[in-house]
Every structure is written in C-alpha cells, then in structure tokens.
Amino acid sequence: MLIKVKRGWELPESAVTPEDIYLNRRQIVKALGIAPAIAATASVLPTGMAMAATDPDPSAGLYPVPRNEKYTVDRALTEEKEATTYNNFYEFGSHKQISRAAQRLETRPWNIVIDGMVEKEFEIGIDDLLKQVQLEERVYRHRCVEAWAMTVPWSGFPMKQLVDLARPTSGAKYVMMQTIAESKAEMPGLRQFWYPWPYQEGLTMEEANNDLAFLVTGMYGKPVRPQNGAPIRLAVPWKYGFKSIKSVIRFSFTDQKPKTFWESLQDKEYGF
Ligand SMILES: Nc1nc2c(c(=O)[nH]1)N[C@H]1C(S)=C(S)[C@@H](COP(=O)(O)O)O[C@H]1N2
Ligand SMILES: [Mo]
C-alpha cells in the first residue's frame, strides 16, 4: 500500500470549531431568492432551507437506464452498501468513512462552467445538461492506489458528449476539471489547508474523447450519491481511482497541462 501523505500532524476534525452556523455563499444566494428578509439574520436560518441531499433528487426519474453490454467486467458487483460507505472524498475528511458527512453536500442548484479554449464559454445546470445527453449504464472497475477496488454499475454518458457540447477550439490539448470547494461547513476537509484545494484533475483531449471516459450521474440504477461524487463525477477505468474526480463544477479547456491535486502533493506516486 502506498502512503499518500504523512498524517501524524493533522488536526483531528473534532479540534476544529464547527462552522455549521455560518451561511455559505450558495445558501445565501438561495436564501435571497426565497426569503430576503431573514437572509440578513444568518444564524436563524434553518439549515434545511437549501436542498439537502436527502430531498428527492429531481433526476431520480431518469434511472435506471439501459446497460451498455460492451462495458461489463468479469467480476461480481461490489455491494451497493459497500460502494456507498467506503469512499475517498478528502473534502469530507481524509479517511474512508465520509458518507454521512457527505450528505451535507447541496447538489441542487448545480451549475457547471465550461470555459477556457472553447468557441463560447457557458454555464449549464446539471438538469439541463442531463436533457442533452444520452444516459447509459456501464459496469466499470476502479482501483485506488491504496490497493482496494470496486466494481460498480455507473450510469452516465460518454465524456465525448460533453466535449462536443463544449466545442473546444483546435488549440485545446487538455481538459481540466474542478470539484466544488465553496464551503467549509459543507466540506470540513477544506479546513485541512495544506491540501491544494480545489481538487483538480485533468485529461488530454484524446483521453477525454476516448469512449471509455465516462461522466457519471448515477449508480446502481439511481442518482449518484453525494459520497460518490454527486451530481456528476468522472470514471476513467484505465487509470487509478484518483483520476475519477467527484462533484465537478468546471470543465476548462486549455493548452497547458493542468496541475492535479495528487500530483502537486506527491508527483512520484501520482502521475498525470
Ligand atoms: N473531489 C474528489 N474526487 C475524488 C477524490 C477526492 O478525495 N476528492 N478521491 C479520489 C480517489 S483517490 C478515489 S479512489 C475515488 C473513490 O471513488 P469512490 O469513493 O466512489 O469509490 O475518488 C476519487 N475522486
Ligand atoms: Mo484512490
């Protein structure tokens, strides 16, 4: 097993003052739309005002989607319970038991920015994006550098469909992706300031257009869970798990090789 970072000096999460009482930017935006009068007195706002992950997901009706039999693996599926309770998502903590904490992630509204070397930069809401793509199910295996692996029936669409919507210019060589990192109350791991937030990953244009590169929006016939990267994450089965960036809010097309989260921490063990 590879050791990612020296952990001995990390602050235990319990030693940090909880910030739940503060309103984060997204909550403020949403609160303003609903009740401008109370938005001023932030501390009395009920936390349930913004959509919690436990609310009905507006995309729930889209699943299950037909399985693409071209992509299956010769392995038993990982139990759903396991795939949704043993996770890596450092924004919620640098251990595997982040699934409960991840329920705080507000997955609606969820706007995705497409920018950089594209014909025209734009922003699109996840539910609008879902209307413009063809969803299918694929069984992929992903392997973490820590030597555990999962076999999961993901639902989503080939990343090529997003590239086509984005219309990169001919000079674009890479696509850089970024995970949301707006609120420490929502994502307590962001308090671990020594990590290079936001989580960032990259693919070459060739990799992004490879039919295997899959943008995941569902799993086990349901919308993808927050702990697994709701509402949209990557799955690139020919790479280690760390490439499969979760909860993406930005796809940026560029001719510069993007810096990636793990590479900037330990480039010997985590290549591009
Ligand atoms: N934003 C973000 N994406 C991430 C990570 C992370 O910490 N933050 N961890 C990566 C790693 S190391 C792995 S192995 C997979 C784990 O995905 P899973 O929890 O759905 O199995 O997510 C990847 N994507
Ligand atoms: Mo990983």
Image (spheres, rainbow, N blue to C red):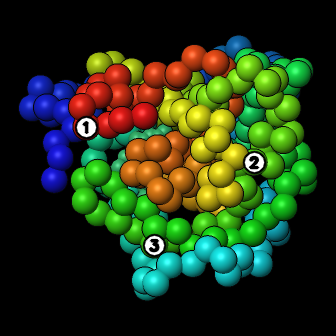
Closer to the N terminus: mark 2 or mark 1?
Answer: 2
* Viewer-side residue, 124 vs 169: 169
* Viewer-side residue, 57 vs 223: 223
Question: Is there any visible trace of residue 161 in the rendered image?
Answer: yes
Which amino acid does the dot numbered 1 rest on? Glu
Closer to the N terminus: mark 3 or mark 2?
Answer: 3
Vertical placement of residue 124 versus 17, above or below: below
Quarter holding the C terminus is top left
- x, y percent for residue 23: 59, 23
**Residue occupied by mark 1:** 269
* Neighbourhood count class around disc 2 (C-alpha, 10 Å): few under 14, some 14–19, many 20 upward: many
On whether ligand 1 comes within 8 Å of the CB at mark 3, the answer is no
**Residue occupied by mark 3:** 151
Vertical placement of residue 229 versus 35, above or below: below
Question: Is there any visible trace of residue 53 in the rendered image?
Answer: no
Q: Are dots 3 and 2 in contact, CB under 8 Å?
A: no
Q: Are dots 1 and 3 in contact, CB under 8 Å?
A: no
Q: Are dots 2 and 1 in contact, CB under 8 Å?
A: no
Q: Secondary structure at mark 1?
A: loop
Horizontal side of 89 relative to 181 (left or right) equals left
State the image quarter where residue 155 is shown.
Answer: bottom right
**Residue occupied by mark 2:** 160
